[in-house]
Every structure is written in structure tokens, then in C-alpha cells.
Image (spheres, rainbow, N blue to C red):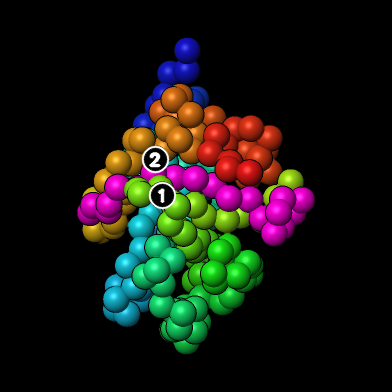
Amino acid sequence: MNSFKKLGNFSYARKPSHKRIKYYKWKEYGFKTALESMRKILNKNNQEFFLACGTLLGCIRNNSFIPHDQDIDIGIFANNFNSKIKDIILHSGEFTLTHELGKLEDSYEVSFFHKQTKVSIDIFLFYPLQKHYYYCASFYGLCNKKPGGFCRWKYPITTLKPTIFYNKVYLIPANAEEHLTMAYGSNWKTPIKFGYLRGLEGLYRNLMD
């Protein structure tokens, strides 16, 4: 059984080296700063958003970003999406565009690069299915062979609620534990280090088709 240790706001399965601790603290500061910059822009322009995917997992499980995460994930309900928000974010001068994938009507994803911290933020649109269920799309790997050229990931979201994350108010799914169980399985509280492409091999549990 792993013995998890707490250093700063990050949790680790084993005590990292001094050099690694310094790196994690720097990385955590960068993620926090980038997310706060995006939060300020979206809130100023009345664009509702919520913590999603790995960022939500870190918020609920660790009360921090996941140490090995490569980017920040946020979600926006498709029917609440301001189609001008991409240009608003770019015109802020704080971000550059990394990529823009899919179509607004069924599979949109857009990614930004925070100039100050060099942290990437992915924005996923969540499209309604039946009551309290949504899906978002992702690309690359096996997803390129799926119908339409993207994967669909199913999530239960009853409503959104506020939470405190790094001393700021963010929205998250009110049924976050159910949401994470569907995405990562019943053992989502146990940290497992993997990236997106490895997750496509079966570690993500909510692939629709």
C-alpha cells in the first residue's frame, strides 16, 4: 500500500528529491497563476465555466493540481458558450492560441498557452445528452479513427456548485464524485500516473463510442 506524503499542496506516493520539490512548487505556482488569469477573463465577460477532467480530479482528490498533469482542463456548457470568447481571450494579451479542434455544433475544443507561465489551458465544450448527462470531445490517438474523427466522453452533471480552490471560487459539478467515478472508475481516489494516450487504452472509463 502506498504511503502518500503531503508537500505544499501536492501529494506524492513517495518523498521526492529536493530538486523535484522545487520543480513541483514552481509548476504549481505556474498552474495556479495561469488558471487565475483565465478565470479573471472569463468572469469579466460573464462566461460560466467549471473545472473539468484532470483538473477537477486534482481539486477533489488532492485539493491541488495533479503533479504530473501537463495542462489545465476547464469545461463550458455548449448552450452557454460565447462564440466570441476565443477572441476575447486572445485580445487580453495574456494567452496565445495553441490549437482549435472540432466543430462548435458537436466537438469543439480550444487550447491556449499562458505567456507568463508557459502553461496550457484546454477548454472543452460539454454537449447535452439525456437529462443530467453531457459529453465532451477529444482528439488524437485512437480517437482519429472514431466516427467524425473524435472520441465522445460521457459525464453526469446535475448542476454546478462553487468550491474554493487555491483561495479562489470556482465552479465544479455538484455531483463531482459520481462524475469522477464514471470518468476514472471506482478507484479514482488512488493516484495513478498516466497521460492522455495511455488513458485511451482503458484507464478512462467513460468512452461512449
> Residue at image x 46%, y 59%?
127
Report the residue marked by disc 1.
130
Residue 16 picture location, percent across and down: 51, 32
> Residue at image x 35%, y 49%?
131
> Counting other residues with Cα less than 10 Å from the Cα at mark 1, is it few (<14), some (14-19), or many (20 or more)?
few
Residue 85 picture location, percent across and down: 44, 79
Q: Is residue 113 visible?
A: no
Residue 121 picture location, percent across and down: 51, 62
- Judged left or right of residue 164, residue 72 is right
The residues colored magenta run 144-162
Amino acid type for the residue under numbered disc 2: His
Q: Quadrant of the C terminus?
A: top right
> Counting other residues with Cα less than 10 Å from the Cα at mark 2, is it few (<14), some (14-19), or many (20 or more)?
many
Task: Report the mark closest to the observer, 2 or 1.
Answer: 1
Nearest the camera: 80 or 5?
A: 80
Q: Earlier in the sequence, mark 2 or mark 1?
A: 1
- Judged left or right of residue 123, residue 196 is right
- Judged left or right of residue 205, residue 128 is left
Report the residue marked by disc 2.
179
> Residue at image x 45%, y 35%?
182
Nearest the camera: 110 or 61?
A: 110
Amino acid type for the residue under numbered disc 1: Gln
> Residue at image x 41%, y 72%?
81
Q: Is residue 119 magenta?
A: no
Disc marking residue 90: none
Q: Secondary structure at mark 2?
A: helix
Nearest the camera: 46 or 83?
A: 83
Q: Is residue 49 visible?
A: yes
Q: Secondary structure at mark 1?
A: loop
